Amino acid sequence: MVESRPETLELHRADSGHDLWAAVEAAQYARVVEHDEPRTDLEAARMRDLIGFFSDCSEEWEGKSASDQTVALEQLGTRLAALEELELSVYWAVTQRGFDTAAGQPVELPVAVLTIARQAQPSITLHLPPTMDID
C-alpha cells in the first residue's frame, strides 16, 4: 500500500448545493464522510438523507446531463437547508491521496471529504489519518 501522510484539511461550509459540485466530482473516485453524533431521530434522518443523496449523485454523476447535474445540485441544496434548520452545517474539501491498485501499482486519486457538524463557521479544520480503509 502507498504510505500516506497525515493531512490537515481546511473544509469550507456549503451554503448551497452548487458549492458541493467539486466534492461530487471527486467523490466518484473516493470519499470520506463524517458527522457529529445525531441527537434526535430527525437529525439522524436528515443526515442519512443528505449522505445517501450525495453518494447516489457521485455514483451517477458522469451519466447525468448538465441539466440533470444542475437539478441534483439544487436537490443537495434542499437537503443542506433541511440540516441548517437543525443548526447543522455541511463542510467539504477535496484532496489527493495515494492508493495501491489490486495489481499493487500506486495511483493518486481525488478524495472528497464531507463533514456534518454543529458549527456555523465559514470553515473548519479536519485531520485525516495517515491511512484509510477502502471499501
Image (tube, helix red, strand yellow):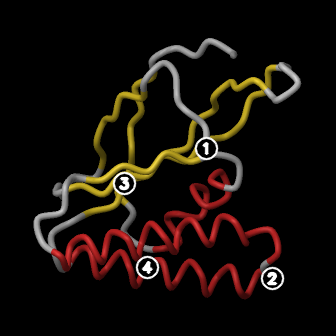
Alpha carbons under labels 2 and 1: distance apart: 28 Å
**Residue 106 higher or lower than 33, as above or below:** above
- 67 vs 3: above or below: below
- Above or below, 91 against 128 in this view is below
Disc 2 versus disc 1: nearer the observer: 1
Distance in Å between CA atoms under marks 4 and 3? 13 Å
Name the quadrant containing residue 65: bottom right
The reply, left or right, for residue 43 in relation to residue 115 is left
In the rendered structure, the answer to whether residue 50 lies left or right of residue 3 reads: left
Measure the alpha-carbon separation of dots 1 and 4: 27 Å
- According to the image, label 4 marks what residue? 77
Identify the residue position indicated by label 1 in the image.
135
Residue 93: give its label: none
Dot 1 and dot 4 residues touching (CB under 8 Å): no
Amino acid found under the numbered disc labelled 3: Tyr
Q: Which residue, given by chain and number where applicable, does mark 2 sit on?
A: 65
* Mark 3 closeness class: few <14, some 14–19, many ≥20 residues within 10 Å: many
Identify residue type, mark 1. Answer: Asp
Number of numbered markers: 4
- Callouts 3 and 2 close, C-beta under 8 Å: no
Task: From the image, tell me which residue sits under label 3.
Answer: 91
